[in-house]
Image (spheres, rainbow, N blue to C red):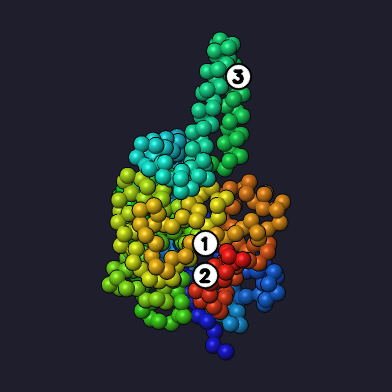
Amino acid sequence: MTKFRRQIFYLSGFDPRGPAFYHALCQSELAKYAALSGSTLPHVSPRTVDGHRADWRIETERCQTDYVFLRWDDLVRARWHKRKDRFLRDVVGTYLSYIFASRNREAMKLAPVVGRTFYFPLALVAAALLTTLVLILFLGWLGLLAFPVLVTSLFFLFHRWQPAWLLHIFNFNRELCGRTRVDLEERCDLYAHQIAASLSIGHYDEILLVGHSNGATLLLMVLDRLRTRFGGAMPLALKLLTLGQLTQFVTLHRDGVALRQTLRRLETITNSWLDISAKADPACFALVSPFAPDGPLPPNLTIASARLHLLYAPAIYRRLKRDQFNYHFLYLRCSDRLGAWNYPGLTISPQPLEHHIAAIRRDAHA
């Protein structure tokens, strides 16, 4: 029997964890999928690291998937401030930039959950100041004695909200809005070269370019380079999968000119493209096209929900929603119930991406 041959090029989000974490995640989620589906446990090879990529092979009786983790975790760690004063300085700059230079009303309309997440820290600061002023008004300067209690309470809420990773993401997206970022541009050039070389060989039945979170934004930058390399018409063996995308953090900003121009050049691509998200995800523009609100959808782009609320028991799902950080990673995990969307299942499926798109469309109308 001839095996279906797939290659996956995976771009993670703004995550300092490298290939060791994602290789282990791949193994554990494939094991869960095998147990849940009753299929044979796939063989996952050890990872090999070569420069700015890590490779491993996933093999079943009917499918062979060569998984390429495109590394930019070193660039993330370089931006992940350890000094709190510098981090706070960047956060203040980011909020000022978005307040005065972004189309906030449109962003709130497209993704209210993201808007509430973004402005939650500001709401905490405003609550502390307002409460202090009210106490001073009624109690005089004695009201200041309550300030340490307020600060402690708000810090607890802030810490419970898991702010650090989201604030780092916000800072990074501000950087994508027009700043010089030579290291990222060079890395995207390298990725495009590697993917183009694989496409030219023609060894695989499909080559899947996957971008999660901010990796979906980098995917667009890589895709634009591939479009140029292939003269505007990329091989149809190249297919696209974006998970929890947040492109609008850049394109709705006044300075996000470069990415808006990139999207205009990509409007006419005909490669199969699946965009998956969930409305409860606080860190993505759920069920919103990466091209929204200004551009049309490419002809073969499908926007769909992961329908995560149906894939877990209600009590478990409520707990998952409270953990904002890990909720954003559910797209990559095997759910407790099998549904039309299942990333581990897709990675070892002997069917092409179009088969999964059709199943997800049927499930959405069931």
Can you say whether 130 is above or below 246 in the image?
A: above
Q: Earlier in the sequence, mark 1 or mark 3?
A: 3
Distance from label 1 to label 2 (Cα)? 9 Å
Q: Residue at x 48, y 61 (%)?
A: 303
Q: Earlier in the sequence, mark 1 or mark 2?
A: 1
Kind of residue indicated by mark 3: Ala
Report the residue marked by disc 1: 304
Q: Count neighbours of disc 1 (C-alpha within 10 A) and say few if under 14, some if 14 to 19, many if 20 or more.
A: many
Distance from label 3 to label 2 (Cα)? 56 Å
Measured as percent of width and height from the top left, residue 132 is found at: 55, 20
Q: Please give the label number shown on residue 357.
A: 2
Q: Nearer the viewer, residue 52 or 244?
A: 244
Q: Residue at x 50, y 28 (%)?
A: 126
Query: In this view of the protein, can residue 254 be seen by the observer?
Result: yes
Q: Are marks 1 and 2 in contact (CB under 8 Å)?
A: yes
Q: Secondary structure at mark 3?
A: helix
Measured as percent of width and height from the top left, residue 192 is found at: 36, 67
Q: Residue at x 54, y 13 (%)?
A: 137
Quarter of the image with the N terminus is bottom right
Q: Please give the label number shown on residue 146.
A: 3
Q: Please give the label number shown on residue 315.
A: none
Distance from label 1 to label 3 (Cα)? 48 Å
Kind of residue indicated by mark 1: Ala
Kind of residue indicated by mark 2: Ile
Q: Nearer the observer, disc 1 or disc 3?
A: 1
Measured as percent of width and height from the top left, residue 204 is found at: 45, 80
Q: Nearer the viewer, residue 162 or 312?
A: 312
Quarter of the rendering containing residue 199: bottom left
Measured as percent of width and height from the top left, residue 155 is found at: 58, 32
